[in-house]
Amino acid sequence: MDTKNEKDNNVILLIVIAIATMVIVVVGATFAYLGSVVENEASANINGHVGDAGDLFQFDSGDNLTLNVTQDNFGVNMTDPFDSTEISVSLTTGKEKVTHEYEISLNVEENNFEYTSGKCYLKNNAQKENTYNTFASCVGSNKAWGISYEDETYACYDLENSELANLNGLDNSEISCMTQANTVWVKEQVPELVLDLYAKNDALTEDECIGGAGTSSKGVCVKYDGTIDSSIKSESSCTSNGMWVANIYENNKCYNLIKRVDITEKAPKDKVTVLDNGTIATTKDKNSTNYYIAGIRMVNLNHNQNVNTEKSFKGSITIAAKNIEAK
């Protein structure tokens, strides 16, 4: 009798151990999954159920983005150095209709590019403000952080009565400005290394996307501050207002530029938000996918061809779900 009770107790104990083990495995896997869905830090495909068990969110964050600029590939009459990868967000549901939100970010791993845009002023009327000794404190009307030919160090200047220097045909660059006596070079944060985000446009054919034979390039006009001017419809009209960014036709899909983000002096380990309000919707048993191209571009301005050579960038794209309550 005791032997039978002992056997029964052993069976019960084994069952309890098995159940406990299964609970630990399931809970552990659940937390591991939720971690991957909420914060995908790697460039990889991520699959997982979000919200109700019938929703499947899939992220493909593409390949790493790298850019190496040298005197051989960056100069006058050369195209902008560019590296890109295709990324996507997919959603499937078992419900009648569902919408989810997501964000796209850039993780910076390496970057030594720098701002080179600015203006060259005559120093004789530029007053040095000795009380403001940092870039952050040099703020206010007519205040500017600049470097002079004589001092060779940056300082805060009052430019209220200053005039622009005539560089006699030289490029408007720090290098040209610093070859002239009695001048002050004022640096401006004009985007020079950028992250361009293109979205798939299902409404355009190949010819409508990139322009057929004998037609002009199709795209958008981007101002030098990085904003897209939708009122300008042609490359010729864009020349004096900014730079023309052509559409991309790749893998039988048309892509339009929808966002440009300045990453010129972003430091390693910086996380830059590229798109913070992405949405995707689908209906029962239908797979919906939003396609994008993310590209790193060095903007080929005349004045940065001397400064931004022998530079490199490396980074990766992260796509993460937003406002998800896992069940």
Image: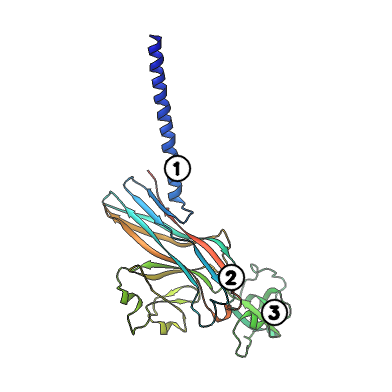
Please say if 72 is above or below 108: below
Looking at the rendered structure, the kind of residue marked 1 is Phe
Relative placement, left or right, of 82 versus 286 is right
* Residue at numbered disc 3: 148
* Residue at numbered disc 2: 311
Report if residue 182 is visible in the image: yes
Q: Residue at 38% across / 71% down in the picture?
A: 256
Across and down, in percent, residue 55 comes to 33, 49
| Among the 4 quarters of the image, the one containing residue 85 | bottom left
3 or 2: mark nearer the eye: 2
Q: Residue furthest bottom?
A: 168
2 or 1: mark nearer the eye: 2
Looking at the rendered structure, the kind of residue marked 2 is Lys
| Real-space Cα separation, disc 3 to disc 2, in angstroms | 25 Å
Across and down, in percent, residue 210 comes to 35, 76
Helix, strand or loop at mark 1: helix
| Real-space Cα separation, disc 3 to disc 1, in angstroms | 57 Å
Q: Quadrant of the C terminus?
A: top left
**Figure colour scheme:** rainbow
Dot placed on the residue nearer the N-terminal end, 2 or 1: 1
Looking at the rendered structure, the kind of residue marked 3 is Ser
* Residue at numbered disc 1: 31
Please say if 48 is above or below 298: above
Across and down, in percent, residue 260 comes to 46, 69
